[in-house]
Structures are given as C-alpha cells and as structure tokens.
Amino acid sequence: MFDLDELLEVLPQKDPVGFVKKVLVCEEHESRTLVRFESAPTLSMLSEAGAQTSIFLRLTEEKKAANVPTRAMGMLVSIKSKWLQKSDKTSFEVKSSYVNNLDSFFVVDFTVLDGEMTVAEGQIAAVLEQNGVAL
Amino acid sequence: MNQTYLSNGLYSVLNQSDEVVVIKLDNASHPVFKAHFEGMPLLPGFLQIDIVTEILGEEIDAIASAKFLQKVLPEETLTYTIAPAKSGVRVKLTNSSNALCGDFKLKWH
C-alpha cells in the first residue's frame, strides 16, 4: 500500500512545472490527481498534467514485477488532446489509465475534470528513461 | 505577446514572421529548467508548443498530434516553421543543427 502524500516526492517535475499537488488514486491501471496552475492553463499544460498523472501508474506491482525502477522518468514522446469545454479555472482533477503498457513504453488516456464536467481529454505516449538512457 | 508565469524570461524572439519564428532560450538558471528536471535541464514538451502559440497570439483548440523527437536544451536557438495544414497548422521545430526536435499538428482559431 502506498502513502499517497509520499508519492508526490517521486514526481520529477518540481514547481513551477510540477502541476500535481495531490495524488488521489494510485491503482494498478488508474491514477487520479489534483492539479493546480498559477493561472488558467493552456491545453498543452493540461496535457502535461495528464502526463504527470500517468507517473503514478508506474508505481504499480506490475511495474515492480517487470523490474522497472520507480525513479525512472517518463520522457514524453507524443501528445494528442482537445478541449471539450474551455475553462478559466486553475484547479482540476485528472484521471489517467493505460491504453498500452509495454514496460518501458506506455500509452495513457487522460481526462481533465472540473467537478463532474470533462473539460479536456487526450492521450500521451512516453518512454521510460533512467540517467538519460531509455530502459 | 503575453508571456505566462512559466514562459516569462524563458526565451527571446530573434526573428518572427507568420511562417517562421526564431527564438533563443534562456540559460539553465531559469526556473523552468531548474524544475524540469533537477540536474538535467530540458525544455518541457508542452512549452515547446506554448511558446509558438504565445508568440503568434493563437489559442489552441486541439493538439491533433505532437511528436517530441529530440531533447531541447537551455540556450539553444530554435526555429519554428509554420505551414497551413488540414484544419489547422503544422509546426516543425528545429534546433541550430537543423535537427527536427518537434512536429506539431495544431488546431487553432
């Protein structure tokens, strides 16, 4: 069982680029976070928040079994995303779940929520690296 | 051009037209590079997109695709080449060695 508050320490992106302020759910195939920005975010920033939320998918028993180091960093390879409802708010909940998980390469869906309303959604692909080398 | 709390001081524009934008990135002491990542400063992918939209005064409705092909380091001189594409624009980002760093298909107003 993970301590959700301690999990934030493994987020490699720090302020002001670290958008995740709280980890709400860290489960095998789904993570949820609370993200916050200093001003209304762009779609690119929300996509980055989706990528940062996906980091908490990596800390799973499945990844440990594959010997993927928990300190490995996911380097963003691609983004695809769209606004569904533009928002001037600065705090959102972000959900992510695996589309494909090939140990060192993964594709993740993400959804950005303002309460019950989905404001943006998309998909990111990332490759895991450690010390600048792909795993 | 309205710089955000993240892009403030992050780059300077060397040349700008509707088709080509050339910028020079700040050094590794900028807060963005210190935060992304500690000991390994890289320009975040999302800012590679936001910088060009910010300079051109555009707002993105959708990122049809964005590919990040090469790491972008502090103090690099970068060139954005912008071309009309099906229902939006295609933006290619190259560094001073002419290596393709990013390839973005964006929908903006």
Image (cartoon, coloured by chain):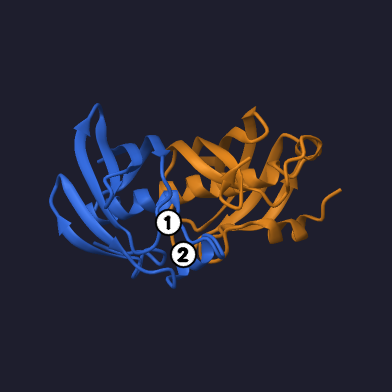
Q: Is residue A72 visible?
A: yes
Label 1 environment density (alpha carbons within 10 Å; few <14, some 14–19, many ≥20)? many
Circles 1 and 2 in contact, beta carbons < 8 Å: yes
Name which residue type carries label 1.
Answer: Leu
Quarter of the rendering occupied by the C terminus of chain B: top left
Q: Nearer the viewer, residue A37 or B86?
A: B86
In the picture, the disc for residue A126 is none
Q: Amino acid at mark 2?
A: Phe
Return the residue at label 2: B33
Q: Quadrant of the N terminus of chain B?
A: bottom left
Which color has been applied to chain A in this rendered view? orange
Res. A115 in view: no
Q: Farthest right residue?
A: A1
Q: Residue at x 40, y 58 (%)?
A: B73
Task: Write the residue at 41% across / 40% down.
Answer: B69
Task: Give the color of chain B as drawn.
Answer: blue
Is the residue B102 above or below the residue B73 in the image?
A: above
In front of the other: A89 or B35: B35
Q: Residue at x 56, y 65 (%)?
A: B38
Q: The residue marked by circle 1 belongs to what chain? A: B
Say whether residue A133 is left or right of residue B1: right
Q: Residue furthest bottom?
A: B29
Q: Which residue is mark 1?
A: B43
